[in-house]
Image (spheres, rainbow, N blue to C red):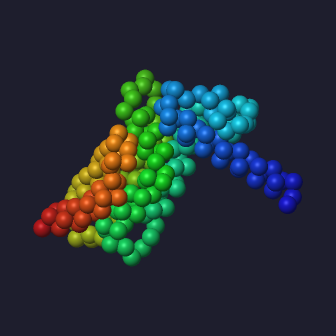
């Protein structure tokens, strides 16, 4: 392996470790309770390494949100599944990569005097999610008009937010798999109702 490739691989590994540590700390302490020093202690890398990759804490948390979202978004990529199966798979992916939603909801609910980069990132991924949901609805229910698709997409996203919050509060006593399975069937029925 060339020196340049090794350096790049080491840089990517350091970045991954920093993002993993930041996700853990922010998941435990929230945005305001997270510091670069805590992330440094958790990942075992010096503060200077973190600042080499990220301008500040806000940019770091934005990167955590973006990475988690991109991992979750791949759940939409399978073809040939019916809606209930697709919804369950998307729900399973959310459980596996929850950082974007956990951190994003915390930031979205806070009223700050200025828009933090992390909050803007979450709002951006949220808009992308809404577009992706609407596209999936159009694919599975082409008879629906634009307003019905928009309504069903918003309903879908609001329900998933609720499922996630219920799971965060109730832990393992909330069966997300069962909720997502039910949600898939409800969406099929809602699409039929909206197309009638």
- Number of numbered markers: 0
Quick check: 31 above or below 17? above
Residue closest to the far top: 113
Q: Residue at x 66, y 44 (%)?
A: 17
Q: Quadrant of the C terminus?
A: bottom left
Quick check: 172 above or below 191? above
Apparent side of residue 83 relative to residue 19 in the rendered image (left or right): left
18 or 142, nearer to the observer: 18
- Measured as percent of width and height from the top left, residue 113 is found at 43, 23
- Measured as percent of width and height from the top left, residue 166 is found at 32, 44
Q: Residue at x 27, y 71 (%)?
A: 142
17 or 176, nearer to the observer: 176
166 or 190, nearer to the observer: 166
Is residue 101 visible in the rendered image? The answer is: yes
- Measured as percent of width and height from the top left, residue 127 is found at 40, 49
Quick check: 27 above or below 142? above
Apparent side of residue 26 relative to residue 21 in the rendered image (left or right): left
Q: Residue at x 55, y 35 (%)?
A: 25
Is residue 36 visible in the rendered image? The answer is: no
Residue 79 in which image quadrant = bottom left
Residue 143 in which image quadrant = bottom left
- Measured as percent of width and height from the top left, residue 19 is found at 61, 43
């Amino acid at each position: 392996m060339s020196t340049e490739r090794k350096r790049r691989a080491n840089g990517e590994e350091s970045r991954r470790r920093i993002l993993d540590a930041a996700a853990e700390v922010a998941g435990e302490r929230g945005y305001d309770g997270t510091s670069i020093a805590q992330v440094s202690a958790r990942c075992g890398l010096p503060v200077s390494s973190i600042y080499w990759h990220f301008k500040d804490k806000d940019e770091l948390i934005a990167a955590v949100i973006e990475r988690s979202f991109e991992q979750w978004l791949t759940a939409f990529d399978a073809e040939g599944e019916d809606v209930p199966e697709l919804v369950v798979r998307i729900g399973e992916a959310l459980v596996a990569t929850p950082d974007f939603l956990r951190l994003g909801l915390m930031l979205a609910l806070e009223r700050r005097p200025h828009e933090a980069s992390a909050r803007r990132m979450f709002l951006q991924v949220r808009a992308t999610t809404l577009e992706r949901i609407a596209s999936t609805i159009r694919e599975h229910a082409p008879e629906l008009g634009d307003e019905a698709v928009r309504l069903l997409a918003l309903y879908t996203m609001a329900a998933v937010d609720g499922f996630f919050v219920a799971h965060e509060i109730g832990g393992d006593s909330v069966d997300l798999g069962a909720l997502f399975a039910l949600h898939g069937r409800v969406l099929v029925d809602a699409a039929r109702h909206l197309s009638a």
